[in-house]
């Protein structure tokens, strides 16, 4: 289980990520495309085309760690907008991983018609 507190900074890397990428490929996206530092202790979350998998990359002071979750049914309510990355809190990431719409955390969003923009 991934444990985050409310103050943890998480970057959702928007768009579709090739989920075959591992630590090196994902850290290259963070540093080269987004111009962020993958060694800064923040969390970087990626989702694939089908929105049924999420990978979270982070540096834990002794090396990179990669956390992976795949849904057996349904899809994550992954934001679909033009930005390259969106900052959210650790609490919001917990909501997203639980199947909630991060913009409307009071309702379960297990339908395939997510309304995040």
Image (cartoon, helix red, strand yellow):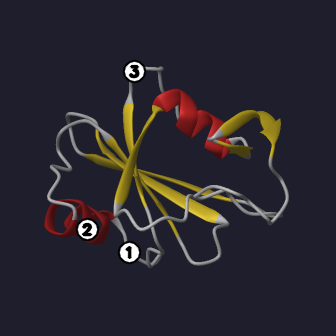
The residue singled out by tag 1 in the image is 21
The answer to whether mark 2 and mark 1 are in CB contact below 8 A is yes
Quadrant (top left, top right, bottom left, bottom right) of the N terminus: top right
Quarter of the rendering containing residue 114: bottom right
Name the foreground residue: 14 vs 64.
Answer: 14
Q: Quick one: label 2 or label 3, which is nearer the N terminus?
A: 3
31 left or right of 8 in image: left
113 left or right of 50 in image: right
Q: Quick one: label 3 or label 1, which is nearer the N terminus?
A: 3
SS assignment at label 1: loop
Name the foreground residue: 81 vs 5.
Answer: 81
The residue singled out by tag 3 in the image is 7
Quadrant (top left, top right, bottom left, bottom right) of the C terminus: bottom right
Q: Position of residue 40 (x, y in %)?
A: 18, 39
**Label 1: few (<14), some or many (≥20) within 10 Å?**
few
Q: Mark 2 and mark 3: span between their CA atoms?
A: 24 Å
Q: Mark 3 and mark 1: span between their CA atoms?
A: 28 Å
Q: How many marks?
A: 3
Q: Position of residue 25 (x, y in %)?
A: 28, 72
Task: Specify the label residue 29 is tagged with.
Answer: 2
Q: Quick one: label 2 or label 1, which is nearer the N terminus?
A: 1
Q: Residue at 17% of width from left, 44% of height from top? A: 39
Name the foreground residue: 72 vs 17.
Answer: 17
SS assignment at label 3: loop
Q: Nearer the viewer, mark 2 or mark 1?
A: 2
């Amino acid at each position: 289980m991934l444990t985050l507190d409310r103050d943890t900074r998480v970057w959702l890397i928007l768009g579709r990520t090739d989920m075959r990428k591992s630590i090196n490929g994902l850290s290259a996206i963070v540093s080269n495309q987004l111009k962020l530092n993958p060694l800064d202790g923040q969390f970087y979350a990626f989702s694939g085309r089908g929105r049924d998998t999420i990978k979270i990359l982070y540096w834990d002071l002794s090396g990179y760690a990669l956390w992976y979750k795949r849904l057996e049914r349904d899809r994550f309510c992954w934001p679909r907008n033009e930005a390259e990355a969106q900052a959210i809190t650790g609490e919001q990431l917990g909501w997203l991983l639980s199947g909630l719409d991060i913009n409307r955390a009071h309702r379960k969003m297990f339908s395939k018609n997510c309304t995040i923009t």
